[in-house]
Amino acid sequence: MSCEEIAVCAVRLRENLCLYFEDDELECDAFCKEKTIKRLFRNVNSQLLVVRPDLNMAAFEDVTDQEVKSGSGMYFDIHCYKTTAPSAGMPVAFSVQVEDKSYYMCCEKEHGKMVVRFREGEVPKDIPGESNMIFFKKTFTSCSSKAFKFEYSLEQGMFLAFEEEDSLRKLILKKLPREDEVDETTKFVTSRNERHNL
């Protein structure tokens, strides 16, 4: 028999029969998909977010009701995950159907800058550890509970936003100096259908 030390962590079962660790130094090491909801995304100008994989971009556009009914590249699946660190916000991942293909949103470094990309494939049910496709969904401000901002999970203070470029409002990642800063370019309103007013 050896004299090895074995670390023991206190745990507790709460009323929902979930296991919780009492050690504050433990970190979440996985995300487990809880539910998926389908939504349209609008910016402060009431434009819809449209994914165009052939152009390797997503941008906010003025869209007709007829175009919305086709839904191609506009209806996002928001995959909500469970986590042991809810204070960061609800962990979510995004996917979208364009024609008969599924694309997931992720962030990648290109030429020293973080960019938003849509890659062909499915969002996994379970994500072990850190992931370049997880964002934390947070209310935009305490007084606007229907508007949200999405913080990139791998870089604190980096949010989904839009930026004008060549007459387009492209989806980007934007670094905010302070999390409580109100920046309208990071404000997103989600809706189930095309009939929605900000």
Image (spheres, grey):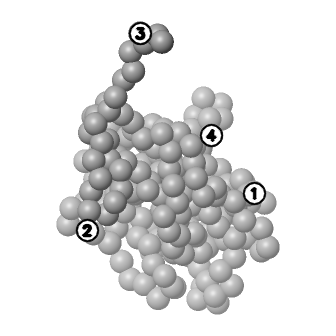
Residue, disc 4: 108
Label 1 sits on a secondary structure element that is strand
Q: Residue furthest left?
A: 143
Residue, disc 1: 120
User: Label 4 is placed on what type of residue?
Assistant: Glu
User: From what the image shows, is residue 104 above or below residue 112?
Assistant: below
Residue drawn where x is 53% and y is 70% of the image: 36
Q: Are the residues flagged by discs 4 and 3 in contact, CB closer than 8 Å?
A: no
Pair 2/3: label in front = 3
Label 3 sits on a secondary structure element that is loop
**Dot 4, crowdedness within 10 Å: few (<14), some or many (≥20)?**
few
Pointer 4 or 2: first along the chain: 4
Residue, disc 2: 144
Residue 77 in view in this figure: yes
Q: CA distance from mark 2 to mark 3?
A: 58 Å
Pointer 4 or 3: first along the chain: 3
Pointer 1 or 4: first along the chain: 4
